[in-house]
Image: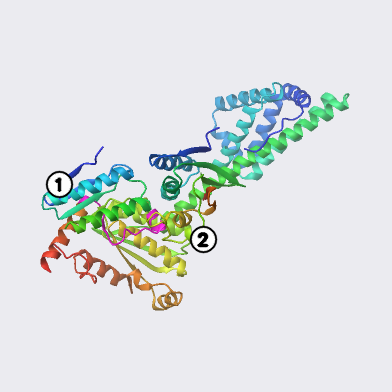
Amino acid sequence: MPIPILQLRDTLIVTIQSELTDAELSQLRQDIAARIGKRAVRGLVIDVSALDVLDSFASRTLVGIAKVSKLRGAHSVIVGIQPDVAYAMVQLGLTLEGTDTALDLDEGMELLEQRKQARRGS
Amino acid sequence: MRPFTPPDPKGMRDYFDVYERHEPQMNEHLMAVCSRIPSLAQVIKAMPKEQLEAQRKAGLQTLRAGCVDGNWGPLLEQQKVQGAMYANMNIPFGDWYELISAFEKVMIPHLVTAYAKEPERLSRSLTALSDYIDQGMGFIAEEYLKVKERIINQQAEAIQELSTPVLQVGERLLLIPLIGVLDTHRARSLTESLLRAVRDYRAKVVVIDITGVAAVDSKVANHLFQTVSAAKLMGAQSIITGLSAEVANSLVVLGVDVNRLNAVGDLQGGLEEANRILAGRGANAHTDPPAP
Amino acid sequence: MEAESAVVAIRHESDIVAARRESRTLGSKLGFTSGELTVIATAISEIARNIVVYAKTGEIHLEIVMDGQRRALQVIAKDQGPGIADITRAMTDGFSTAGGLGLGLPGAKRLMDEFEIHSEPGRGTTVTMKKWAR
């Protein structure tokens, strides 16, 4: 079943409800890329608050989605990493490589807005 | 659970016969012993008569199940419950040990009187009683210790919680003043509390003051790095305060990248920097997103 | 007597989640904090994914083991896959033949208290890891 992608003005919001298989992730990546192209999408929020584990595969995938989105002109932020998950990731050595993270959807949207302003200003 | 070897059945049967015959007397004697031991006297006094009677009946039943029917399960369970009760009521080891010894002491003369003319029978019943008491005490003791350990661990956790408070000192600002030794277990527990607080208070900045930390070595530094990184994944920035110049130097000598710690000299300075960050004017303002 | 062990067959990606879930069930019997349970589940996720990616099938045995009064959750991941020729290299961060980051093995080792790996090319791989409860 495809993951719903919501659009709020120029931001896409994806909520990952459960562990995704490779196939589902590929599909998601494609869907996001397609949506970014369609309307002027400048931002992508990926909400992972439902995930109780973020392993190296999941983290690689999220970073991959962020990079691809960047190439197509949209800035990404990953939100909702749970306390236990954050700690396990750090002990495992995962950093999400420069991808923005925020506490929740609210913070994520605000961060995207700030990034947008920064780009306008420069 | 520890292994249990049922004592000699004939010996146990003979013992039980004598015990049953003298049970009311035995019970009175044990109550008298209890009343002389303050910790146990308190327990007896607090129990309503009906409860004491019910326990007495149940005790006799489980003993019969073991001695006569060879079904030791209920009795062993009862020993476990007894052990746990002693631990939960904080009854000293010596006290309940004394009670059980008193029981054995009184039973022996009764057995001698009953089987005086049958030395083999007497020997078997005495051996069986001794075996039963030994093993029974083992079960009580094991449970007693297990429960006591659990209580002690819970208390230690509680003390730790108290000594590592996470304080909300501003709308999106947390302050964690660390005091004492930061061993691995405490560091982990601290990080978990901090991260949970970041979520619960929606903190954007966390100030960790290590002025009171006893020994700051590379291990402690690593714990701090991990905490800072994990907080970052949750969208919170961290500031370490209270890192003295001497400690910073020694860490640098150990190869620790002190710059990664975003350390500010003292607590006041740290809080001021935190508020600047929250207002969008922090030291890293050129890399942070500007205020809307 | 409650179940103190479980075996999860690893054949598809979905089995990775099953193995993680089982570890939480068993782990909570040992009184691990939720943080520790997540750490264990993450280590299992890494190892289980290795099985799916490299060996295609395998199994994960979860068991509560004791050493005196101490108890641990033991995880044994076995597969009959191609095996690892150079374990030392595989245990270095960044090594991988499948083009990924390859954090699986060293990462799992960092997360757990004890970690052992036996592997022979053509004979499969067995990873044994433990986390001790306080």
- Looking at the picture, do discs 1 and 2 lie on one chain? no
Residue B19 versus residue C82: which sits nearer the camera?
C82
Point out which mark residue A54 bears: none
Residue A92 part of the magenta-drawn span:
yes
Residue C133 appears anywhere in the view: no
**Image depth: mark 1 or mark 2 in front:** 2
In whole angstroms, how far apart are the C-alphas of marks 1 and 2? 47 Å
Residue B46 versus residue A78: which sits nearer the camera?
A78
Left or right: C54 as drawn, with respect to B292: right
Task: Please say if A89 is above or below B145.
Answer: below
Task: Please say if B60 is above or below C120.
Answer: above
Residue A27 part of the magenta-drawn span:
no
Left or right: C82 as drawn, with respect to A86: right
What secondary structure is found at the residue carrying circle 2? helix
Which residues are the magenta region?
A87-105
What secondary structure is found at the residue carrying circle 1? strand
Q: The residue marked by circle 1 belongs to what chain?
A: A
To which residue does mark 2 refer? C88
Left or right: B24 as drawn, with respect to B240: right
Which percent across, then down, holds residue B260? 35, 70
Quadrant of the image containing the N terminus of chain C: top right
Q: Amino acid at mark 1?
A: Gln
Q: From this viewpoint, which residue is outermost toward the front?
A: C122
To which residue does mark 1 refer? A7
Q: Amino acid at mark 2?
A: Thr
Residue A2 found in image quarter: top left
| Colour basis | rainbow
Which percent across, then down, holds residue B276? 21, 68
Which percent across, then down, holds residue C25? 45, 39
